[in-house]
Amino acid sequence: MPEGKIIKALSGFYYVLSGNETVQCRGRGVFRKNKVTPLVGDEVVFQAENDKEGYILEVKERKNELIRPPIANVDQSILVFSAVEPSFSTALLDRFLVLVEYNQIKPIICITKMDLTNSEQYDDIQSYANDYRQAGYEVLLTSSETEEGIKDLYPFLEGEISVFAGQSGVGKSSLLNVLRPDLELRTNDISTHLGRGKHTTRHVELIKVGDGLVADTPGFSSLEFTDIEMEDLNFCFPEIQQKSEECKFRGCLHLAEPKCAVKLATENKEIPVYRYEHYITFLQEIKERKPRY
């Protein structure tokens, strides 16, 4: 049986890339019975009735999957956040980072619209970028308008399956248009009434960029920690996880425990206060989460 990778899912059809051919497939009823929904990025076995149409028979085991956006087998996530319009949010970025880290996907932070910043905003973004680099993250400062920093992004995409994710209106589609001008992806300005971007990407699709595949995804601005437990959160903040090894008590949650190295490092400004505060906020959110039945 032929095998391939789902590169697009739209209106009940799955477009499977097999070699140099793309075959439009439907899922067999067995998937509904087994509650398995094929996702973009899935490696699948399919049966082709002809060279253009077929049926997916099997979804191979996934190394990871995301729910929002719905995609599987991702190597890395390019977290696209704008410096302005909408304003840069460390709280939202940290939320994305936690979910990406939890799914064992390498995050790369890409801050767009640097050309729109004034000197004060520019300095603020540079300061935040330094904080995240200090924590071990790759941070790129870019502009789709001037193409600043775009060439620095290409090497990260080579040979990888990357998902572009972030709040709507931050310039994901504009960034992809610079990387692949022939795409001519639709973009929209920020809604002045809502203060956020209008959704321009309606479905998830893997697009070839150089020797890699990149997913453009619908924008979204709310994420929930549905599967993450309190003891997991520590590992989703690299600098907190590193310092936690010096805590007196194993399993320290860095709340009110004595001789907590993380709290001490925060007081000494070795860990940014906002990162620690977000950790505590997320911890409380997980603690208060309604149990699933």
Image (cartoon, rainbow, N blue to C red):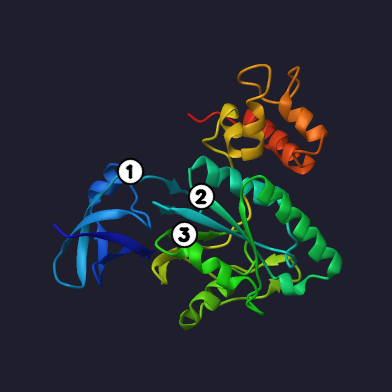
First in residue order: circle 2 vs circle 3: 2
Q: Secondary structure at mark 2?
A: strand
Mark number, residue 162: 3
- Quadrant holding the N terminus: bottom left
Say which of 191 and 144 sits in front. Answer: 144
Image-quadrant location for residue 89: bottom right
Residue at image x 66%, y 34%? Answer: 240
Any part of residue 160 in sight: yes
Q: Which residue is mark 2?
A: 106
**Callout 1, which amino acid?**
Lys
- Graded by Cα atoms within 10 Å as few (under 14), some (14 to 19) or many (20 or more), the crowding at tag 2 reads some
- Graded by Cα atoms within 10 Å as few (under 14), some (14 to 19) or many (20 or more), the crowding at tag 1 reads few
Viewer-side label of 1, 2: 2
Residue at image x 46%, y 83%? Answer: 182
25, above or below 187, in the image: above
- Graded by Cα atoms within 10 Å as few (under 14), some (14 to 19) or many (20 or more), the crowding at tag 3 reads many
**Callout 2, which amino acid?**
Lys
Residue at image x 37%, y 65%? Answer: 8
Any part of residue 89 in sight: no
First in residue order: circle 1 vs circle 2: 1
Image-quadrant location for residue 147: bottom right
Mark number, residue 35: 1
Relative horizontal placement of residue 202, taking residue 174 as reference (left or right): left
Q: Secondary structure at mark 3?
A: strand
Image position, residue 83 (x, y; %): 73, 64
Relative horizontal placement of residue 94, taking residue 123 as reference (left or right): left
Image position, residue 73 (x, y; %): 39, 51
Residue at image x 73%, y 18%? Answer: 257
Label 2, label 3: how far apart the Cα atoms are: 9 Å
133, above or below 259, in the image: below
Image position, residue 223 (x, y; %): 60, 47
